[in-house]
Image: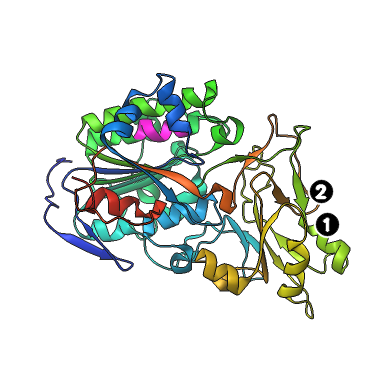
């Protein structure tokens, strides 16, 4: 492939009601899963992250709000569509599909209601690379792309050894990166994303690259701890290599992270299904935890956001009033109230949305959660308390950049429209 065979400078595209200039140099947007404010700063203070230190002092360093529920799927799709879930439709990792009546993972591309930015950039002549840690996101992020050598690729660390030209637009990924498939519960799953991004930038120079990690480290290790600093030091080295190749880099997060355990070190849980069973009778209500995904070892499917389907004759207002009187409940909202407050699709919510406070998590029934994999005190996310995330760029904001409340899904706008 001739790296600079396509000239995309000077034009712009419109996607989902927002306009973006075409890249003048390669743009890399990174979603650091679970990266609450403080991780980067502590690594810099420890002398482990010189590239991040330069960005904090010479580039752009902002705080932004992520989407609530502060989970992986809704926020990654907001970042790559430039809009909240009310527009793109992905409001959890897991939900009750109203069409089938079944609880399913929300990773099927059919659930996405608008296209991402990537097909539009591809139609404008850009080469695209999308690399994720876990395969659960790949189909959503790559939807609509014409995959193939010299055009676009979309693959995951988790299934890198299964990548094909037909399915992923690339083959021989592990040989290219020089790494075997990492364990899904390891920092290596994220490092593979960065290593692959560097190799692809060296070989193919895509104009648009999106890198999305896993929060395995953040679930287990707080900012400033040795393991967390090791992780950000690793990332720092790869970012420096991308910058040396002339890339504009924007980093944000899909959500923050907080300690969710009591004085005894055990998860501090409100088991909502048990609560509703006591109020209404066994299984009369149905509690859904949108944090649920196939990888629950590090969080036990415990997060700070839940939806509840109520039986006929029971009103959301009545149940919300009872919940609000309970310690540890930050918000209990009807689906209409939640859709308005959090910009969510009302048709994909339960009758009631429940958000817990900063150090509490929500579960279904105690007997349904296997917490044997929690080898450290629980850190998790999902609520309003995990909404603040970093929004960094290795370029400075232009002098007349709009002052506004920043969202993590402003990442591409920042990279393409608002920095020098």
Q: Earlier in the sequence, mark 2 or mark 1?
A: 1
The residues bearing labels 2 and 1 have C-alpha atoms spaced at a distance of 8 Å
Q: Secondary structure at mark 1?
A: helix
Which residue is found at the position 70% from the left and 29% from the top?
375
Position of 276 relative to 167 (above/below):
below
Where does residue 1 sit, x and y in percent of width and height? 18, 41
Where does residue 378 sit, x and y in percent of width and height? 67, 37
Which residue is found at the position 45% from the left and 36% from the top?
161
Query: In the rendered image, which residue does mark 1 sit on?
Result: 274
Where does residue 8 sit, x and y in percent of width and height? 14, 52
Q: Report the side of 257 relative to 279 (left or right).
A: left
Task: Please state which of residues 341 and 103 is positioned toward the viewer in this rendering.
Answer: 341
Quarter of the image where one finds residue 272? bottom right
Q: Report the side of 60 relative to 77 (left or right).
A: left
Residues shaded magenta: 190-196
Position of 165 relative to 338 (above/below):
above
Q: Which mark is residue 225?
A: none
């Amino acid at each position: 492939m001739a790296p600079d065979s396509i000239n995309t400078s000077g034009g712009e595209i419109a996607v989902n009601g927002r306009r973006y200039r075409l890249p003048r140099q390669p743009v890399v947007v990174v979603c650091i899963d679970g990266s609450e404010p403080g991780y980067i700063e502590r690594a810099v203070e420890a002398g482990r992250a010189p590239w991040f230190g330069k960005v904090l002092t010479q580039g752009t360093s902002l705080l932004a709000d992520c989407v609530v529920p502060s989970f992986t799927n809704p926020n990654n799709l907001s970042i790559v569509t430039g809009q909240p879930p009310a527009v793109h439709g992905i409001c959890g990792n897991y939900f009750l599909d109203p069409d089938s009546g079944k609880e399913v993972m929300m990773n099927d591309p059919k659930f996405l209601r608008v296209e991402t930015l990537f097909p539009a950039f591809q139609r404008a002549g850009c080469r695209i690379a999308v690399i994720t840690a876990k395969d659960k996101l790949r189909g959503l992020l790559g939807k609509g792309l014409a995959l193939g050598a010299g055009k676009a690729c979309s693959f995951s660390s988790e299934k890198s050894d299964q990548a094909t030209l037909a399915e992923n637009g690339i083959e021989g990924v592990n040989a290219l990166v020089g790494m075997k498939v990492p364990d899904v519960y390891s920092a290596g799953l994220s490092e593979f994303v960065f290593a692959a991004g560097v190799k692809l930038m060296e070989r193919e120079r895509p104009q648009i690259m999106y890198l999305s990690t896993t929060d395995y480290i953040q679930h287990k290790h707080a900012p400033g701890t040795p393991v967390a600093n090791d992780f950000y030091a690793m990332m720092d080295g790869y970012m420096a290599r991308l910058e040396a190749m002339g890339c504009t880099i924007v980093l944000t997060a899909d959500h923050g992270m907080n300690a969710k355990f009591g004085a005894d070190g055990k998860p501090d849980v409100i088991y909502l299904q048990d609560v509703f069973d006591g109020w209404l009778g066994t299984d009369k209500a149905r509690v859904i935890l949108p944090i649920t995904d196939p990888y629950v070892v590090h969080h036990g499917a415990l997060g700070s956001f839940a939806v509840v389907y109520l039986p006929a004759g029971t009103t959301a207002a009545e149940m919300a009033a009872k919940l609000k009187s309970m310690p540890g409940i930050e918000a209990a909202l009807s689906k209409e109230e939640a859709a308005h407050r959090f910009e969510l699709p009302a048709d994909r919510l339960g009758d009631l949305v429940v958000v817990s406070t900063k150090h509490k998590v929500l579960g279904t029934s105690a007997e349904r959660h296997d917490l044997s994999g929690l080898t450290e005190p629980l850190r998790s996310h999902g609520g309003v308390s995990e909404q603040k995330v970093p929004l960094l760029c290795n370029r400075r904001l232009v002098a007349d950049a709009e002052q506004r409340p920043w969202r993590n899904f402003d990442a591409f706008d920042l990279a393409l429209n608002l920095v020098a």
